[in-house]
Amino acid sequence: METERKRGIEALTTGAMTDVWRWVRGKIPPGVEVFDAHAHIGADVDGRTVTAESMREQMEAAGVAKSIVFPLNDPNARDDYSGPNDVIWAAHEEYPGSFVPFFRLNPHLDYDREFDRCVERGFMGLKLHPVSQQFELDDPRAVRLFAKAAEADLPVLIHAGFAMQRIVEPLLPTIEAHPELRLILGHAGMVEILEAVRAFEDHPNVHFETSVVRAKDLYVLFSTLDPSRISYGSDIPYGDLPSTLHGTLAAAEAAGVPDEALPGILSENIRRWFS
């Protein structure tokens, strides 16, 4: 029996959207296993929820092979996010070929024990959300956390989209101090997208992720940055797979990105970090 999630995907890929989805599928090069660099599992204070099963169903329906997943702004996070992080690990264990598990922390709180626990357990990255957890990227507690991630060779995905005020100026000193640190700018740093491209273009370990970014900002991104530094993302449940794939591919085409770069954008640029 088809689920509500699958019917939701169908609503975005059939009927009036049939031609759009056909164009998307035609743009994805044969053999490319799409890798979503930004998705959530769990519950959020705003009432949204995503289960591992529903996430996997959406991926299957849209032809997405693998997703980076991490907690939402969970009302049950307590002091250290250990509960929501456990939900992510359980999803990874249930679907080991589908999910790349990232854990989440709040820099304001005592995070050392949970950081060490998650690294020892085998989590493959860290998610930080300056808006939800109300911190600046140059807060000393956040800077120390970036340093710990660099030392552990752990990628960090930072929310760098809606409601952010400062990205480049507070983040650049950390990137310069830790050039080995692998950073994913969630939502492509869209509030300062051109400044971010210029500031970080000589830092190859900084990647820009495309989820829920305005079309004009995606066009700027693809027009100004080496496409090997760009990775597709959906931001489920705030975005969806069909429309974010369309937005990413349409912006790349409008900016004149060659088709040869699409496997990297859709999969290989981020996949190589986890090979």
Image (spheres, rainbow, N blue to C red):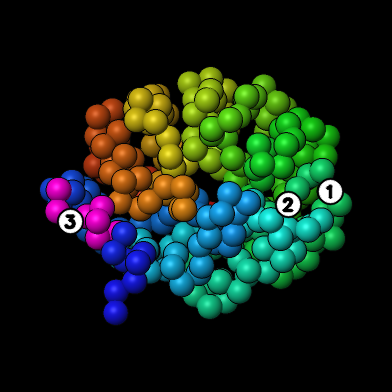
Comes first in the chain, label 2 or label 3: 3
- Residue under pointer 2: 105
Q: Any magenta on residue 84? A: no
Residue 3 quadrant: bottom left
Residue at x-position 49% and y-position 75%? 95
Residue at x-position 46% and y-position 59%? 67
Alpha carbon of mark 1 to alpha carbon of mark 3: how far? Answer: 46 Å
- Residue type, numbered disc 1: Leu
Other-residue count near label 1 (Cα within 10 Å), few / some / many at <14 / 14–19 / ≥20: few
- Asked which secondary structure carries label 2, the reply is loop
Q: Is residue 112 left or right of residue 154?
A: right
- Residue under pointer 1: 109
From which residue to which does the magenta span run? 9-16
Q: Is residue 210 left or right of residue 89?
A: left
Comes first in the chain, label 1 or label 3: 3
- Asked which secondary structure carries label 1, the reply is loop
Quadrant of image for the N terminus: bottom left
Q: Nearer the viewer, residue 75 or 118?
A: 75
Labelled pair 1, 2 in contact (Cβ < 8 Å): yes
Residue 162 in sight: yes
Q: Is residue 91 left or right of residue 141?
A: left
Labelled pair 2, 3 in contact (Cβ < 8 Å): no
- Residue type, numbered disc 3: Thr
Percent across and percent down for residue 55 are 44, 64
Check the image and name the residue furthest to the front.
Answer: 47
- Residue under pointer 3: 14
Percent across and percent down for residue 99 are 50, 66
- Residue type, numbered disc 2: Leu
Alpha carbon of mark 1 to alpha carbon of mark 2: how far? Answer: 8 Å
